[in-house]
Structure formats: C-alpha cells, structure tokens
Amino acid sequence: MASRLFFEALRDAIVEEMDRDPNVFVLGEDVGHYGGSYKVTKDLHRKYGELRMLDTPIAEASFSGLAVGAAMCGLRPILEGMNMGFLLLAFSQIANNGGMLRYTSGGQFTVPMVVRGPGGVGRQLGAEHSQRLEAYFYAVPGLKIVAPSTPKEAKGLLKAAIRDNNTVLFFEHVLLYNLREDIPEDDDFIIPLGKANVLREGEDITIVSYSRMVHHCLQAVDSLVAEGYEPEVIDLRTLKPLDLETIGKSLKKTHRLLIVEEDYKTGGLGGEIIALIDEHYFDELDAPAVRLASKDIPTPYNGRMEAVTIPQPEDIIREAKKLMEA
Amino acid sequence: MIQEKIKLATTSLTQDEALAVYRDMILGRVFEDRCAQMYYQGKMFGFVHLYSGQEAVSSGVISQLGPLDYVSSTYRDHVHALSKGVPARAVMAELFGKATGCSRGRGGSMHLFSAEHRLLGGYAFVAEGIPVATGSAFKSKYLKEVLNDPHRTEVTACFFGDGASNNGAFFESMNMAALWKLPILFVCENNLWSIGMAHSRASSVHDIYKKALAFDIPGVQVDGMDVVAVHKVAKEAIERARAGEGPTLIEALTYRFRGHSLADPDELRDKEEKERWRKQDPIPKFQHFLYEQGMATELELKSIDREIEVAIDDAVQFALDSPEPPVDEIYRFIHAEDE
C-alpha cells in the first residue's frame, strides 16, 4: 500500500496506463509544461514528450473534436478540462461525437476517450467555476459518467475509464484533490465501471450519493449512528450506467431512500433515480424517496450563500431522520 | 507564405488518372441525379443534400489519396464517400435506410461512414467535422513520431463549405494544424451560399483562401469547376502534407446546381447566376480537356457513362432488395461492448 493524495492517485493511474499502452496520450490546457491546473500531470511531459502530453490552445470545442478524431483512428486520448465547466464549449463534440458517433456509424467507429477534470462547488470560485455537469450530459446516449469519492476510488476508476472503449466523462471534485488514502500498489488495480460501492451496511435507511457529497453523508452518518440509527450508505461511483441493482438490494432491507447530490435538483440525477425506483422497486418503499440536491441557482460567490446552496451534513441528518421516523 | 489564385493549370495527369477522375465525376453526377429521382418517388427521406456541380472538387482531391488516407465530410457527403471508394451500393442502401447501408441504416444521408475506406463521416453541424479531421491528422503525426511507424505519412482531406469558414472550429483547427504541422488539407468548397445566406453577406473577407494568412500557412484559391486545376493544387498540398510541411487551405470556387437540399425550393438564388454557373459545368469542361489532350474519344467517354448508369441501376436495385435493419437491434452499437 502507498499513501497517496487524490491528485497523485490520478497521476499514478495515468502513468501506469500510458506505460501500458503507447496509444494513450493526454491533451488539454496547461497539461504539459505547467503540469495541469491541479498538478495531476506535473512533470509528465518530461517523461512522455510534447505529443503525448499535448498542451493545447484555449479552444475547447476544437481540441475536444481533435481528441474524438484521434480516438476514432486508434489513439486513446485523456482530455483534461482545466475546469470541467469550460467543456460546455465542447458540448457538441462530446455529445454528437463522443456519445453518438459509434451508433450513427453503425458500430464502425468507437471513441475511446476519457474526459476528466475538476468541477463541483469549491470554495467561493463563483458560478462559472462551480459547475456540476453530470445532469447536463446524463441524457446523452453512449456516454459513461464516473464521479469518484476518494483517492483509491479515483485511481481504480480512472484506470478502468482509460481502458474502456467508450467516451467516459470523469468528474473530479476540486475539494477532494488533497484527500489522502492508502492505495494498493498494483498496476492492475481496477475498479470496474458500473458497480456501486456499499460503504456502510445498515437496516434503517439507504443513503445514495457520489463524489464529494459522499463525505457529507459519512459525517451525517456518524451523528446518526451516535443516536442509534443504522443507515446504509452507497457510493454510486459510476453515474451512468447506473447500478440500480445495488440500490434495489439495499431497499429490500431498509425500505427508505435518501439521495444526496451536489448537482441542481431540477432535471438532476436524483429525480432520475427516483423514477427508476418507482418503475422497479416501488413495492419496497415504506415512504416516498427523498432527494437532497443543490438549490436551482447559479452558485453565489458569498461564502454563506454558497454553503447553503449545496446539501450540508445537518440537512442530511434532518432528512434522514424524517424518513426513518415516517 | 503563398497566398495565390490559380488561374490556369498545366496538368501532370496521366491518361489513366484522367480517365479514373472522369469516371469518378460521372459516378457522382449520375448517383446524385438518381437520388433526386428516388427522393421524389418516396424511396428516401429526411434531408438529402446533393453535390451536383461540385464534382471537380471531390474527384480532383480524393482521386490522389490512398487507402490509408482519411476524408471527412459534411452533410453533403455522398460524393466524397463515392470518391473515397465506398461502393455505390452501400451509399444508396444507406440512403434507403437499409441494413446493408454503409452506416447500417443508423446514419442516413448526412452521416455516411466507412471505417474500411477511412471515411471519417458526414457531419451534420456546420464545421463539426473540421476538428475531427484535425484529430485524424494528429493521429498520423503521432503514428510517425511516437509510435515510429515506418510507412509514408497518412494525409487527411477535410471538406467543408463557405459557411464553415466563419465558424470558430475552422479557425481553432487551422491554428492547431499549423502549430503542429499536421498532414491535412482544409478544402473549402465555396459554393457561395449557406442555404439562403450569400457568402458575401456572411464573411467580412470574401476570399476564403486569405484566411490562411492568419496562420501563416499556404492558402490557394482554385477554379472548383476545373478538375485539372483542382488536381494540381491538391497534388501540391498532399505532397507538402506527406513531407511534414503542414496544412494547406484550398478554396475551391464552385456552385451547387440544385437547392441546398431536396426540400429547398431554391427560389432565392438568381436565375442568371444559376445559368452562368451551369455553363461552367465541370463535366463537359473536362470532356473537352480530354479530347483536346487526345486522352479519350467521345465514344470512350460515352462507354464510361453507360457503365456508370448500369452501376447506379445496380445500386438502386441492391438498395431496394436489401433488408431493413431488424427493429429489435435498435440498441445495437450504442456502446463499444455491444457488437
């Protein structure tokens, strides 16, 4: 085991996969000489050279399209969004090409591309740098979406994403980069996409979350356990395809569901999960499923306003108790 | 850097090449005329954008590419696909939405693909294919310089229209291609109209080849109704690309003889303008050239024309006889895992 910070774990994953497969390369703004906005690719250009650690001009739509073309022709690009919000400028290339092109080409071309980078609500970064894109991209056919919660998860999932033959959006949370964890020192340590992780077993309620909100949930759970409750906590890891089976299995035990997400409430993943639970596990519910999500507002700069924009541990404690007492 | 208008071309076309180019132009023209018939007979649907009038560009450029070179196209992609070697049967069947189509009935007129022929696709958003083509050119450079592939450098020919030359993707991609000296031809087919928007009303600079100046790469304007001239210009650009000297912007002045798509009544364009361009039809012009050069007789060309008619009859029959893709395969090809 090696103790690694979140951003170091990502770097390890990239290095291992680049050493394993010469077709893997990294591109994006400041990924080379500067080492990436969160230092994920620091010094890697020295090892891999300019073409495999490709510093691009600030032209998100076109370097994303370039990555698509390279992927169609056999390379395996890892595209870093300096801030994932910037990739709204590349929505068409990611959706039309990354998501749909395999289908429209009748299966002839695949786009094995990872689109990764920092996002989420940080510390007073303002609305445009505090974006959560998972719901925006969720409906696009063909895309896979991953959002890791810890360094170990980040490494195992990123390696799986790089080896995957589809376009995978890999959302890293800005406030998790300096999290530390012990990680297995094994080049083939992989966490398969599409499998959720039961972090804590319990019988009273199922709390489903992903990325940074997992940590808010775990804080809340500490208090709930101290009060005698036994919540079950599921880290989704992969948002699409969704591991509905693991949620359903948990509901058969707890019969209560709370979803905690940092994305907007409207049109968000929580609403989608509730609809799926209605379709597949309605009879298991003893109370209506509840979602805690961000307020439907551009993230405000002010620190207090920003804090109440996203779900906090006390919100989770309150909603969980209401549900368990219902 | 060279920014030039090519007026007259002395040709390096051999007789065999010239006849192959002629055959390809006829194939494009006859195919598109048949598409119009089939569309009006209700055999094909959706938006169908025909290429008639612009054949000299597709044939002049793509005839010089090899099987390992790439082509990217737009929604007006049938003829680029044919020139790159995609069989007329497969293209026609795709337009009919059949399982035997080159995109297995999933793509349609605007999304023709062929991995085998390195046709990167028809892209239906204006300028969408330009960055993708820049990516295939990047891969060709990567293949040489990172993976040490010993073969000759692959070249990408990226086709788009005058409308795309006002889009950010055009500028962003040319910048990257120039920066990294990528082996690519940016071939702008300036047919003067973006549906109903006249080029002169859309672009502050009317001569698109001059836009290459911004990136310090060669920009060349060529008579896109003259396949001999297009061939010459493309030959030089391909040689530069293969030699690692980077991209070229080619502006081919051309005209579409039909409306934007078969759904367009084409009422806006001036009748005189249309007639003036009709007189520039690249096919009779090339026939005249072939006679003049003693490369073919009228009889020989007529025999090629007949062969093509037969091939298109066959393509239509093939498309008619082909099965529809099974509806229970509707999810097939979404993910790389499902084959």
Image: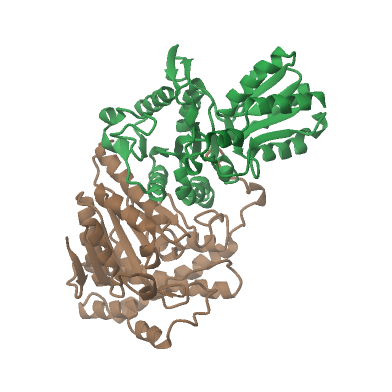
- On screen, residue A200 versus residue A129, left or right, reads right
The answer to whether residue B202 is above or below residue A255 is below
Residue A176 x, y percent position in the rendering:
49, 26
- On screen, residue A139 versus residue A7, left or right, reads right
Q: Which of the 4 image quadrants contains residue A240?
A: top right
Could you tell me if residue A167 is visible in this image? yes
Residue placed at 61% from the left, 53% from the top? B325
The answer to whether residue A184 is above or below residue A48 is above
Q: Quadrant of the N terminus of chain A?
A: top left
Residue A192 x, y percent position in the rendering:
54, 26
Q: Nearer the viewer, residue B15 or B161?
A: B161
Q: Which of the 4 image quadrants contains residue A31?
A: top left
Residue placed at 25% from the left, 41% from the top? B144
Q: In the rendered image of this protein, which colour is used for chain B?
A: brown
Q: In the rendered image of this protein, which colour is used for chain A?
A: green
Q: Quadrant of the C terminus of chain A?
A: top right
